[in-house]
Image (cartoon, rainbow, N blue to C red):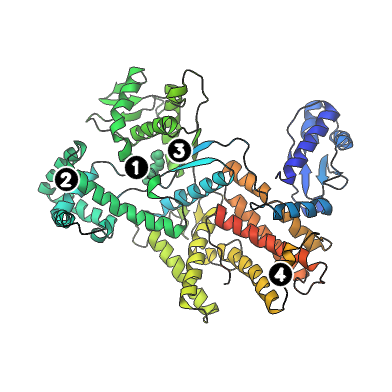
């Protein structure tokens, strides 16, 4: 279903073509103020400059040619030459019924489905996920959900940091603590065990090992030997590496599950996966003359990148000791994604500090011609598109990057525990009569939802201040507010039942929509704009367009519910009002659950 704004835009384009012979895209936006109507076009102003004409006269000409009376009332010209448009209630009513019949409530499917690889989350083994990974994880998940909603083939890739010299140390530490011998013995006896039972906190494990590494020369020497063994594929060391990786991955998976993020073990393709491809990456780039030796290291010098001193900036892919780098792995990953996963597009979601890395990476692969799948290179297939999606930092209430009192990174797990704990005490206070299991369910939905929603509702590119008080507030643009709005609508059905009104049956029978009250009309207009909000959110991968839309929807619902009785309405219009309630609930649910991965609750 096409959103109204798109139909209007097409009509405006046609009218401009007829009036001026110009083929220009329509500039149509939602009106900034309700007194200007619902939509506004400033095409006449832009064109007048170009054609050296009077903008108001041009606007006149455009509206003379504009065929839009099936959608809008008579267009008006305002100010210097704006065209103001007001939707007709008949059009809105008809669309409301169409949306009701659509499980996606007007969110459109793409005409050109693509295979899109989304690289997000990417935590590091034996380190806790901290708040920095929070944004990548949840924004990445939302991007995937939106792309899937639009009908694309999405391939999620969790580029976990699971390779590097520290794994020699960790693998040796497992032996040092004699966990390993114990494991092998149990393994022989085929007793089940989980890595997590032995390494409950991977970060702590890392810290202990590092302390030994720094203070005990013998330990350090052994660790270095283990790195060599790991690289040469030694079975025993590989087992240890796998064990540590599994323990960490289990921690990550728990967090994804709590966060409602769809990332499974099948989506994990860590750095280690690309390890065997790295020598080829370097050799191939050397062969075509792009990679050269510089101060013992192998580097590329993509055009346009300079150091502060104005020297060409190197993109290092192999150190003088032979070690490969983060960049080398990313080069291998692109080849894999283009050739094996058949990506039309690759989206990376990381914080803004990696901007330069990705700019250089993209420049290198473009130059190397690696964006055309090998199998197609002769047929001149299209280049895969590369996109780096960045986001700002999470700040503490003091405006500095969020840290614990002792100055450490705040751990994601502790943050979520705290949010749920606070939500629980609100539930205890407001609904002491509920069963404990129900309180838990609500506290989890609200606490986790609040953390996610607060992140989504901020413009993704800005920093934002993390505040439990704000994100858990029952009023304002927060998850609890949206969840409450949803639960409140759900309670209407239950109240109807008590009054002996079969709301389900009335809803099924609704044939006509009445939008005579201003609050009804306002709510209905907002409801038919869900597809428009979805399109603007996906266009720029900005979840805050969705949260703003939902917030406005909840506000319009409140105004409607205050002004218009629903259950006590006269029988003729009651089904129509029930429909407005039902569609509001469905839209909130679709937005929160399907697109943002935030749970709704039936009562709160
Ligand atoms: N592990 C990296 C980090 O913690 C993020 C990985 C991002 N993805 C990539 N293909 N480089 O910063």
Work out how far the residue at label 4 is from the one at label 3, CA to CA, in angstroms: 53 Å
- Foreground disc of the pair 3, 2: 2
Work out how far the residue at label 3 is from the one at label 2, CA to CA, in angstroms: 39 Å
Work out whether residue 487 can be spotted: yes
| Ligand 1 picture quarter | top left
Q: Which of the two labelled residues, at mark 4 and mark 1, occupies the earlier sequence position?
A: 1
Between residues 160 and 20, which one lies in front from this camera angle? 160
Name the disc covering residue 355, or none: 3
Residue 77, position as x, y percentages in the image: 86, 43
Q: Which element type, helix, strand or loop, lies under badge 3?
A: helix
Work out how far the residue at label 2 is from the one at label 1, CA to CA, in angstroms: 20 Å
Q: Which of the two labelled residues, at mark 3 and mark 1, occupies the earlier sequence position?
A: 1
Work out whether residue 29 can be spotted: no
The vertical placement of 602 against 202, above or below, is below
The vertical placement of 413 against 114, above or below, is below
- Residue 551 in the figure: left or right of residue 573: left
Residue 148, position as x, y percentages in the image: 55, 45
Work out how far the residue at label 3 is from the one at label 1, CA to CA, in angstroms: 21 Å
Which residue carries the number 1 mark?
Answer: 270
Name the disc covering residue 236, or none: 2
């Amino acid at each position: 279903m096409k959103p109204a704004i798109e139909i209007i835009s097409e009509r405006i384009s046609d009218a401009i073509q007829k009036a001026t012979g110009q083929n220009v895209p329509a500039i149509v936006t939602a009106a900034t103020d309700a007194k200007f109507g619902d939509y506004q076009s400033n095409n006449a102003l832009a064109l007048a400059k170009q054609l050296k004409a009077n903008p108001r006269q041009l606007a006149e000409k455009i509206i003379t040619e504009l065929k839009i009376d099936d959608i809008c009332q008579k267009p008006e010209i305002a100010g210097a030459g704006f065209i103001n448009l007001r939707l007709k209630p008949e059009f809105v009513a008809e669309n409301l019924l169409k949306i009701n019949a659509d499980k996606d409530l007007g969110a459109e499917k793409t005409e050109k489905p693509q295979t899109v690889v989304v690289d997000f989350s990417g935590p590091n083994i034996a380190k806790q996920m901290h708040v920095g990974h929070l944004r990548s994880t949840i924004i990445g998940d939302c991007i995937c959900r939106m792309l899937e909603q639009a009908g694309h083939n999405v391939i999620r890739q969790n580029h976990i940091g699971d390779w590097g010299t520290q794994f020699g140390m960790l693998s040796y530490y497992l032996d040092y603590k004699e966990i390993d011998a114990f494991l092998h013995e149990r393994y022989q006896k085929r007793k089940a065990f989980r890595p997590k039972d032995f390494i409950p906190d991977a970060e702590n494990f890392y810290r202990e090992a590092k302390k030994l590494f720094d203070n005990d020369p013998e330990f350090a020497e052994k660790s270095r030997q283990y790195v060599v063994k790991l690289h040469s594929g030694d079975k025993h060391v590989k087992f240890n590496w796998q064990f540590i990786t599994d323990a960490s991955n289990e921690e990550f998976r728990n967090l994804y599950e709590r966060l409602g993020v769809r990332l499974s073990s099948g989506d994990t393709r860590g750095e280690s996966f690309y390890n065997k491809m790295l020598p080829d990456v370097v050799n191939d780039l050397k062969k075509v003359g792009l990679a050269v030796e510089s101060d013992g290291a192998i580097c590329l010098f993509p055009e346009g990148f300079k150091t502060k001193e104005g020297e060409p900036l190197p993109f290092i892919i192999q150190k003088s000791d032979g070690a490969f780098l983060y960049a080398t792995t990313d080069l291998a990953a692109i080849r894999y994604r283009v050739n094996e996963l058949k990506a039309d597009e690759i989206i990376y979601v990381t914080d803004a500090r990696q901007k330069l890395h990705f700019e250089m990476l993209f420049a290198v692969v473009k130059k190397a011609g690696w964006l055309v799948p090998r199998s197609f290179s002769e047929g001149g297939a299209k280049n895969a598109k590369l996109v780096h999606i960045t986001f700002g930092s999470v700040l503490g209430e003091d405006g500095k990057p969020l840290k614990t009192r002792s100055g450490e990174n705040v751990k994601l797990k502790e943050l979520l525990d705290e949010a749920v704990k606070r939500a629980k005490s609100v539930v205890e206070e407001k609904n002491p009569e509920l069963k404990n299991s129900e309180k838990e369910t609500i506290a989890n939905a609200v606490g986790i939802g609040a953390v996610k929603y607060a992140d989504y509702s901020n413009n993704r590119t800005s920093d934002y201040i993390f505040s439990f008080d704000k994100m858990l507030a029952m009023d304002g643009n927060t998850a609890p507010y949206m969840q409450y709005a949803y639960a409140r609508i759900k309670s209407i059905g239950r109240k109807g039942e008590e009054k002996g009104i079969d709301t389900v049956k009335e809803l099924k029978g609704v044939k006509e929509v009445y939008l005579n009250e201003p609050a009804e009309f306002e709510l209905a207009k907002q409801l038919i704009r869900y597809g428009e909000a979805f399109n603007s959110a996906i266009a720029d991968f900005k979840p805050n367009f969705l949260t703003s839309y939902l917030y406005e929807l909840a506000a319009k619902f409140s105004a409607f519910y205050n002004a218009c009785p629903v259950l006590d309405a006269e029988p003729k219009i009651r089904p129509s009002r029930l429909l407005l309630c039902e569609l509001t609930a469905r839209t909130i649910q679709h937005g929160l659950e399907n697109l943002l991965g935030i749970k709704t609750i039936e009562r709160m």
